[in-house]
Image: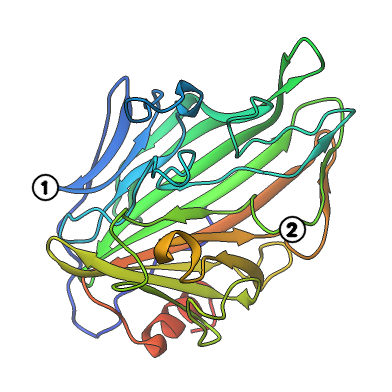
Amino acid sequence: MRMLVLLFVLTAGVAPGADLQVAETAAAITITRGTIPVLTYHKAEVDPPEGVDPVFRRSGFIHPLCAPSGAPVTGIHPKDHAHHLGLWHAWVKTGHGKDKPDFWNLRAKTGRVRHARTVSILDSTTEDPAVGFVVEQEHVAYKGDDRKETVVLRELLEVKAEHDDGQNVVSYVIEQENVSGETLRLPAYRYGGGLAFRGPHDWDRTNSDYLTSEGLDRANSHATRAKWVMMHGPTAKGVAAVAVLIAAGNRDFPNRIRTWPAKTNNGAVFFNVVPTQEHAWEIKPGEKAVMAYLLVVTDRKPAAGEVDAWWEAYAGKK
């Protein structure tokens, strides 16, 4: 599953940062740099805020994803979309036999994604300084009048992190296999499927924005194609940014994206890579689908040329 060696020492002679550590408990897998958090993956279900429908309880997502300072750059269970979960992914509009499971929007109770088991914990080696984990997740449909539970996709999610040149660099690779007896149909739809990101609850149209590889922002980036997208906004420890680099081998690359305009929830930051926004797809029984991304998290707002160079390196073009 490992896509590329993460090579992000962009200045000759710059030493890599402090070593990262990975630790597992019954509830979560955490990656830290000394005492500074890098990210947390939730194995156990996390409850929504008090007073919110417990249907929004879920496992199998990352929060917080942190800037190198340790400040969180993700938010979960916002009032406007209680199913938004930091860093996650799920299919929305689907067909499976006679049913139309929605693995993203939990309120309808037709589907969900959940953590199943830890496959391996990945410690650093001389050849590969990254640490991380591989987990198995299940995309579960509740089918028919009796809501019979059916695992449609069995997924391996590999997450690996490095701290390099002052930045947190996170590889996020999804491998989904249709383990059911029916084709999963994925009609064209405006969101869902690929990596999704929800920013901190205080990021809005007054203090944050998007920038894409095509030079577009909050006002004009939705439903366009991009090789990378960067989101930036304030934290308690200063400005931070998250650049999502999309692997060139992903289906329908450069991918279409979903971003929110200023009028949506006061410009809250939500971002989604959407491999089926323009063209339908299907995953037949026994088939596998792979999607890969690289996230670079910084304590500053990088220039577009820097992010271009990161993507070129990720794509193996430099």
Q: Which corner quadrant of the image does residue 288 belong to? A: top right
Question: Label 1 amino acid?
Answer: Gly
Answer with mark 1 or mark 2, whichever residue precedes in sequence.
1
Give the residue displayed 59% in from the left and 30% down from the top: 107
Q: Is residue 139 visible?
A: no
Q: Position of residue 263 (x, y in %)?
A: 48, 68
- The reply, left or right, for residue 168 in relation to residue 108 is left
Q: Which corner quadrant of the image does residue 17 belong to? A: bottom left
Q: Position of residue 314 (x, y in %)?
A: 48, 72
**Mark 1 against mark 2, which lies toward the viewer?**
2
* Label 2: which secondary element: loop
Point out which mark residue 178 bears: none
- The reply, left or right, for residue 61 in relation to residue 177 is left
Give the residue displayed 65% in from the left and 69% down from the top: 255
Between 139 and 55, the one lying in front of the other is 55
* Label 1: which secondary element: loop
Between 307 and 16, the one lying in front of the other is 307
> Where is mark 2, residue-wise?
276
> Where is mark 1, residue-wise?
34
Question: Label 2 amino acid?
Answer: Thr
Q: Height in image: 65 above or below 317?
A: above
Between 178 and 83, the one lying in front of the other is 83
Q: Position of residue 22 (x, y in %)?
A: 26, 39
Q: Height in image: 171 above or below 152?
A: below
Q: Position of residue 145 (x, y in %)?
A: 81, 13
Give the residue displayed 82% in from the left and 17% down from the top: 144
Q: Is residue 82 visible?
A: yes
Give the residue displayed 87% in from the left and 30% down from the top: 182
- The reply, left or right, for residue 192 in relation to residue 300 is right
